[in-house]
Each structure stands twice: as C-alpha cells, then as structure tokens.
Image (cartoon, rainbow, N blue to C red):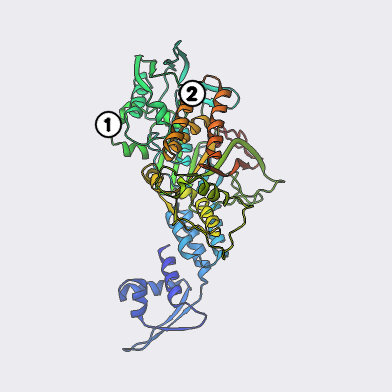
Amino acid sequence: MKLHSQFLKLHSHHGGPAEIPVTLDELAHTLGCTHRNALHIINKMAGLAWITWTPSRGRGKRSKLTFLADAEEIALESVKQAISSRDFGSAIEGIRGHARSSSLQNTLEGWLLAYFGHHSEIRSNKQIDTLRLPVNQKLHTFDPLYMNLLAESFVSSHVFDGLVGRSSERGIVPGLAHAWDVDGSRTGWTFHLRKEVLFHHGKVLSAEDVVYSLQRLIQTSQRTLYSSIFKEITGVEALNSTTVRIVLRKPNELFLPFLCTSRAAIVPRDMESGPESAFGRRPVGTGPFKLVEISEELCVLEVFPYYYQGRAHLDRVEILHVPFGIEQAQPDTASAFHVIPNPSTADASSWSRIHSESYVRKFVTCNTKKNGPLSDPLLRADILSCLSEAAPPIDPGTPEMLPGPLQIATIPQYLGDAEYIASRLIRHGYACSVLSVSPEEFKGPVRLQSDLIVFSLLRDQDEELRLFDLYQTLAQHVEPGIRAGIEGMLNLIAGQPDPGARGEGFKRIEDKLTRDHQLHILYEKPVQTAYLPSVRGVTFNSQGWVDLRHLWFPRV
C-alpha cells in the first residue's frame, strides 16, 4: 500500500499524458527520501509496469518518466488491499487522499462499504456468523459514566446490563434484578438480584457491585446526563450478597426508568484496581457480548456464551467508524448491508422497513440569560420567525436596526442544522457565526456565552428522562422568573405517579417556552431501519437501535 501512495504522490506532482522530463533530484524531493531510495522505488514501479523510466547520465541532464497505470486504478487497488488486510485507517485515509473526482470518491467508498453486512464462515466445523456495521460517530469510551454519544450507548447496551430493562410491550422488566419492592413513602427501593450471573472476566455478580456502580455515579464530578435523578440517592446498601436497598431523598417517579438506561449499567467493583480511562476502552460487563478489540476505527464484540438471558445468535459483531455518509449497498449484490439504521433510500421491492417508535427532534433555543439582544421578546420572535420556510427575506434596500453577530452554539453532530439556521438568519439580515464544540465542552460555559443553542432530543422509550434533563438544561438559559416556573413544574412531574399527568406537565413547559419565543422546533423525523428479508429477529432497544442479541440469519 505504501508503494501505491508513492505512485499517487508522483502522479499528482508529475503526472500527464506524455513523457515527462524529470531529474532524480526532483523525484527524491517529491517522495521525501534519498536518491538511492527514490531510484529503488522507481525501479519497483517500473517492474510492475506502472511506469517507464529512461535514465540519462550526466550532470543537468533530465531523465524521462512515463506513467502507464491509471491513477484511479492504483487508488482503488490501494483501498482494496487496505480493506482486505483490515487496515481501515489506511483505507479511510486513502479515500480522503486519493479521490480526485466524485465518481472515484463513490467508487472507493463503495469498496469500503462492501465490507459490511452478514458474513458466515466455518471454523473447526462450526459456523461463525459475523455482522459488520458502520457508524458515523467515533467511539471514544464505553464506560457508562463517561459516554456522550448514542453510538457509544448502543455498544454499551450490549456489553452491560442494568438492574431493570425496558420492553416495548411490557414496560419496565427485570434485568439483573429479578424482582424489586418499594416502600410506602416511595423513597426506599429494594432490588433482589439473580444468582450466579457472570461478568465477562468470570467474576460472579454480587450486591457489592451494584453498590459500587451507583456510588460511582453519585460521587462523580462529571457533568452527566440524568445526574439530577441519581444525585437524589442518599444511600445504597448491600443487605446481603443478592439484595440491595437504595434510599432516595424524596419520591421520584423517574428513578426506576433511570435504572433502565445505559448510564445506570452495573460494572464490576474490581475495576477500581485499574485506571478508569482503561476501563472505558476495555469494559467488562454482564451483557450478551464482550468487547475483544478496540482501535481508532474498529470495535469488535464477541458473543458471551454464558449470558444469563440466553446466548445471542450472532457470534461476532464488528462496528467500524466511517466518517462519511453511509449509503446502502444494492440488495442484489453479495455485499448488501442487511441492516441499515436510518436509511436515506431503499428499494421497497427488496427491502423491509420497520419503525422503532423513536423520533429525532431538532430545535433551537434562545439564551436570554446572556445580556444581549435576545432579552428583547419582540426581537426573539422575529429571529425565530425567520426559521420558517414561509418567511420572506428582508428587502436589502430597507434599513434595519439589527444586533451584532449572533453566535450559534452546537456540537459537531448538529453542525449542519446550525449552519442551516445561520443561512436563514443571514438571508433576513442577521449576522451570524457558528461555534461547534465537543459534547464535553458543550456542557460547560459555551452555551451561556452564545445567543442561540442547537439541541437534539431523541424521543424514545426514555423520552421522559430526556425531557426532564433537557428542560433542566434550558432553565439555565432563561430569565429567573421563567426558570423558577420550569423548575417548579419539573418538581411536580418527578413526584407524579401518573404517566399521563407527567406528559401533560412536559407539554405545558414546551408550550410556555414556545409562546415566549424561547424555543423553536426545527423538525422531527422518525428513526427507521431498513433490512433485507434474510435478516430475522429484528427488534429494538429503548433507544431505537437494533437489538443485536436477537438478530439471526438462516443457513443457506
């Protein structure tokens, strides 16, 4: 692959349809090597019939170089070799570096995407089923305490378990706890653990692991999703090896749903013997799959055959970070994806679609806590009205008293939405700048220093928790009077046992923020999955991701 890159470098600097006069000095400079190494490289390329090289002797005389091989063919061969040797970093860099046209870019990406889908092989007389999936979010950590991205949560949900889980048909269901009780005050919760549940490293789960996991959450200084829920825990105690009692400061009807989330996953207490950062890259849980390999581009899961809820059908799952748009392969090829989250297109005659009952909502909020133009409700109303497709742009000949540049803050995943907002506002005469920061930075002061903030809400089975956390965050951006009203309503919601009444409370907060021009919903779209009929057992977890434990492929 190195020789391919060297050829492409030479072609980029010296390529052309005809014979090229060039000195060895110039070639060595292009390749960044010595005369001797440059000559060695040239001879290797000539031996492969990629070039012809006619040397000329004598000072100042120029040799003759002719390119025989097509640069696009060499680029394609380089990417194919990288993929076959599982050097995905080189493959992706090759796609970025070698593509000189959109058609070549598509061809190179197609070769990488052909790697995905279901693959089966026989090892020691056993059929090994592997599913290869692309994700466009880079995977940093799978430690439940530090995860920020949905893709990380997706992997974590297959490596770890919680005390309880969710079922779309049955609601909250047993997990590591087979039963639980709550006292009359609804502040004391007792969980009864299953016996002989194994962690991936062979240790048996005990109540002490649950105590350690929850105390780790309570004591963290991290700005963590759902922290307002678990910070209400005042005590965690192991009554015996299979019984845990948790005490809350006050009743909170969102506590049990919180325990279903990947944030509340149970980790082994002996992880404290090593650095937490190492655990995030080498996690140990009780889930249906164990992580066996992790790199910048690739995460590999293998089935955990002793899983307490039954062995998964797949043997291996490879999850590859692909930093460009993911389009599905054609269903009549051998390399069809088989399972595609959020497909952009699908041939209805060949692909089945299933709705996960999850939606993604994108919206923008106004920071009125900042001393700036958005403290004016009339100006806020005008700014947010500009985001409507029906709003006509201003007449450039009409003088407008507009504020200075508005800063729009977001994270890289929502950068496209933020840039769309900026373009709409610019059309209406507002100067804008977009600031995109990491999810961790986004939790800090960046939001309070900006004028407009772009958020996303996943409306899934954890929607109540997400709304609660969202409105607590939005309360930090608004004037004190509105903030007090939001926080008061959230306290009522947390203590409300009726799900319908909780839903009405959230709707009242949304309506209030919308009327006051604090909140504008950009759009909402369903989360869907397209899959080939050969895929069986397609179900979803609480976040709308395909549950890998139930997927299987019939033998052919």
Tell me where residue 248 appears, x and y as whole percent.
Answer: 39, 19
Q: Is residue 474 above or below residue 347?
A: above
| Residue, far top | 184
- Whole-Å distance between the Cαs marked 2 and 1? 42 Å
Does residue 554 appear in the picture of this structure?
no
Compare residues 117 and 96 and report the one nearer the observer. 96
* Residue at 52%, 47% in the rendered image: 378
Tell me where residue 551 appears, x and y as whole percent.
Answer: 57, 35
Callout 2 secondary element: helix
Tag count = 2
Q: Residue 273 shows which numbered tag?
A: 1
Q: Residue 492 shows which numbered tag?
A: 2
Report the quarter where the N terminus lies. Answer: bottom left
CB under 8 Å between discs 2 and 1: no
Report the quarter where the C terminus lies. Answer: top right
Q: Nearer the viewer, mark 2 or mark 1?
A: 2
Classify mark 1: residues with Cα within 10 Å, few (<14), some (14-19) or many (20+): few
Q: Amino acid at mark 2?
A: Leu
Callout 1 secondary element: helix
Q: Amino acid at mark 1?
A: Ser
Classify mark 2: residues with Cα within 10 Å, few (<14), some (14-19) or many (20+): few
Compare residues 518 and 76 and report the one nearer the observer. 518
